[in-house]
Amino acid sequence: MALTTLDPITALIVVDLQNGLLGSSFIHPIAEVVARASALAAAFRRRGLPVALVNVDGSAPGRTERAPRHSGPLPDGWTDLLPELDRQASDIVVTKRTWGAFASTDLERRLKERGVTQVVITGVATGTGVEATARQAYEAGFNVTLAADAMTDIRPEAHDYSLANVFPRLGETGSTQSIIDLLDRTHAHELA
């Protein structure tokens, strides 16, 4: 893990921590991932930095070899963000219909309007929603940091591959605590 710096205006992006995905067989305890994402959101909000909460409602319309996990209407409450994230009125909230949070939303515009130059990404699933969001953020010109202990997947090989092979090419990775510590150092004057 090679976390070096956070830009003055860095946003947190929390991907797909919503009711409908809670029952998935994640390789890491989802409660721990949610707790770390919540700690990051609180740390960003304390410093007045943007927090983007992303949920997924459906999928892209393209034809695939593997059928989507859900067909037909989603159950009531499926897209509801987890209450532990403590959604605030100042949060950016977007609903996506693709793996990544940028392709089918106005997230890029909303972040750039706020002067954001870097994003920290957390959530599920590591090899799909998180990775696609990281790729799209990188391609949009944002510096990317990934909170490695605040994400998980249902497929161990996808999680491990993203962490070892994809994320180092898109940005930097670090633990939740190392990101919060770096926020403390970067924004120490604001909390004094």
Image (spheres, rainbow, N blue to C red):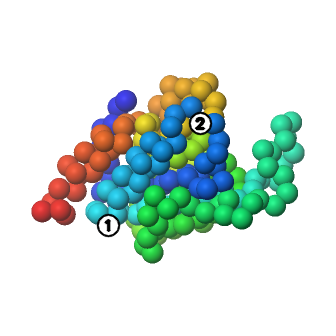
**Is mark 1 in CB contact (under 8 Å) with mark 2?**
no
Horizontal arrangement in the rendering, residue 102 relative to residue 169 (left or right): right
| Residue farthest along the bottom direction in this orientation | 89
Residue 26, label in figure: 2
Residue 57 image point, x, y percent: 70, 59
The amino acid at mark 1 is Gly
Residue 147, label in figure: none
Residue 141 image point, x, y percent: 49, 51
- Quadrant assignment, res 68: top right
N-terminal of the pair, mark 1 or mark 2, is 2
Horizontal arrangement in the rendering, residue 108 relative to residue 192 (left or right): right
Residue receiving disc 1 = 48
Residue at position x 12%, y 62% in the image: 192
Q: Is residue 51 visible?
A: yes
Residue 171 image point, x, y percent: 45, 38
Distance of label 1 from label 2 (alpha carbons): 32 Å
